[in-house]
């Protein structure tokens, strides 16, 4: 009886260790699938939990300033230039949405006016039902995509902007007048 109990205890311990190892491996695999270019967190560009303003202190200008501050944390080459514009505000049942657009391009001396630009659309959501001391919620999408990104959960890649610009240039080159 005692040997059976010690066998079951050892079995539980082994099973627990196997489950923990499987969970660690699954988490590492998911991390690598979401960010295939690195094998772990990049110490030069760590994910930051960006401090967004509380709902009670929000203004359109402050929202634009915070978007600019958030963008400055991205790991993009310095040749990228951008311009952020406020588009509109929208009232929905339980919140108010503020929409912004950031246009990106890489002007050069030879071509100061870019052939195409890439846009990122930001939405800042102010809840009407949560306490107004809670921070605003921020979402963003890249032009021509539906995937909604959240600050602190997505590492923005320069390649995504390049792909949008390249696809526009290819489309424009295929059109003849």
Image (cartoon, grey):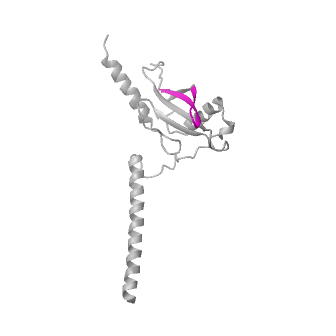
Point out residue 27 in the picture as x, y percentages from the top left corner: 42, 56
Residue found at the very far right of the displayed protein:
57
Can residue 56 be found in the magenta stretch?
no
Q: Quadrant of residue 175?
A: top left
Point out residue 169 in the picture as x, y percentages from the top left corner: 37, 22
Number of marks in picture: 0
The residue under the point 67% across, 42% down is 132
Q: Quadrant of the N terminus?
A: bottom left
The residue under the point 67% across, 44% down is 133
The residue under the point 61% across, 31% down is 64
Residue found at the very far bottom of the displayed protein:
1
Depth check, front residue: 137 or 120? 137
Can residue 95 be found in the magenta stretch?
yes
Instruction: State whether residue 80 is above or below residue 74.
Output: above
Q: Quadrant of the C terminus?
A: top left
Depth check, front residue: 136 or 17? 136
Residue found at the very far top of the displayed protein:
177
Residue found at the very far front of the displayed protein:
93
Q: Quadrant of residue 67?
A: top right
Point out residue 149 in the picture as x, y percentages from the top left corner: 48, 40
Magenta-highlighted residues: 88-105
Main SS of the magenta part reads strand
Residue 108 visible in image: yes
Depth check, front residue: 125 or 76? 125
Point out residue 144 in the picture as x, y percentages from the top left corner: 41, 29
Left or right of 4? Residue 102 is: right
Instruction: State whether residue 173 is above or below residue 38.
Output: above
Residue 86 visible in image: no
The residue under the point 48% across, 51% down is 41
């Amino acid at each position: 009886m005692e040997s059976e109990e010690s066998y079951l205890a050892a079995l539980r311990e082994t099973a627990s260790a196997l489950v923990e190892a499987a969970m660690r491996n699954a988490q590492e695999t998911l991390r690598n699938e979401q960010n295939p270019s690195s094998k772990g967190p990049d110490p030069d560009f760590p994910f930051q939990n960006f401090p967004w303003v509380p709902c009670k202190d929000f203004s359109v200008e402050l929202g634009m300033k915070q978007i600019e501050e958030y963008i400055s944390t991205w790991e993009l080459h310095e040749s990228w230039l951008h311009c952020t514009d406020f588009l509109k505000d929208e009232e929905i049942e339980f919140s108010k949405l503020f929409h912004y657009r950031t246009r990106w391009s890489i002007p050069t001396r030879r071509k100061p006016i870019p052939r195409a630009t890439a846009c990122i659309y930001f939405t800042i959501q102010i809840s009407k039902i949560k306490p107004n001391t809670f921070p605003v919620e921020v979402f963003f999408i890249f032009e021509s995509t539906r995937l909604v990104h959240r600050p602190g959960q997505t590492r923005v890649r320069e390649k995504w902007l390049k792909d949008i610009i390249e696809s526009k240039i290819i489309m424009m080159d295929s059109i003849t007048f």
